[in-house]
Structures are given as structure tokens and as C-alpha cells.
Image: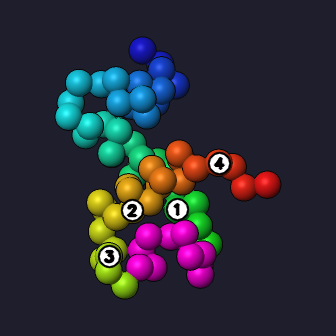
Amino acid sequence: MTNKEYLILALNDEIDDGGAAREAFIHYNIACPYTLGDERALCRSRTRRMSRETCVQCKEAWLNAQMDE
């Protein structure tokens, strides 16, 4: 299996590990897509604390969003 194939499987959550590969891949390999001050960043919320879970949720929301023009 190539790294590219593993990446596709992990992002599609097709690896039977309870989602651990997907979460780890997103957390460690996708940089924060937002610049300082962007209101879409979940870590800016007063009701959320900065954590791995918040970061992964934010990056997943970005992956599922439409591209910016």
C-alpha cells in the first residue's frame, strides 16, 4: 500500500480502527486552514477550549466545506 492509498483510506474512514487513523492523520498532517482572526476557527469560540478534539473537528469542518473562491 502506498502512502497515497493509506491517506485516501484514512480520510474515508475505511481503516477498521475506530476512527483513530482518520483523527491522527487530520491532526498531524493538515495545517490549520484559518488565519489569525478568522471567525470560522473553532478555537476562537469562548465555549470551546483549545484541544486536539477541537482542532480535528475544525479541520473536518473545513474539509467538508465548499472551497473559498
State yes or no: discs 1 and 2 in contact (Cβ < 8 Å). Answer: yes
The residue segment tinted magenta is: 36-45
User: Marks 2 and 3, how far apart in space?
Assistant: 10 Å
Secondary structure mostly seen in magenta is loop
35 relative to 22 in the view: left or right: right
Nearest to N terminus: mark 1 or mark 2: 1
Label 1 sits on what residue type?
A: Cys
User: Marks 2 and 4, how far apart in space?
Assistant: 19 Å
User: Marks 4 and 1, how far apart in space?
Assistant: 16 Å
What secondary structure is found at the residue carrying circle 1?
loop
User: Marks 1 and 3, how far apart in space?
Assistant: 16 Å
Q: Position of residue 62 (x, y in %)?
A: 54, 54
Residue that label 2 marks: 55
Residue 25 image-quadrant placement: top left
Label 4 sits on what residue type?
A: Gln
Residue that label 3 marks: 48
The relative height of residue 67 versus residue 18 in the rendered view (above or below) is below
The relative height of residue 58 versus residue 38 in the rendered view (above or below) is above
Q: Position of residue 28 (x, y in %)?
A: 40, 51
Label 3 sits on what residue type?
A: Arg
Nearest to N terminus: mark 4 or mark 1: 1
Quadrant containing the C terminus is bottom right
What secondary structure is found at the residue carrying circle 3?
loop
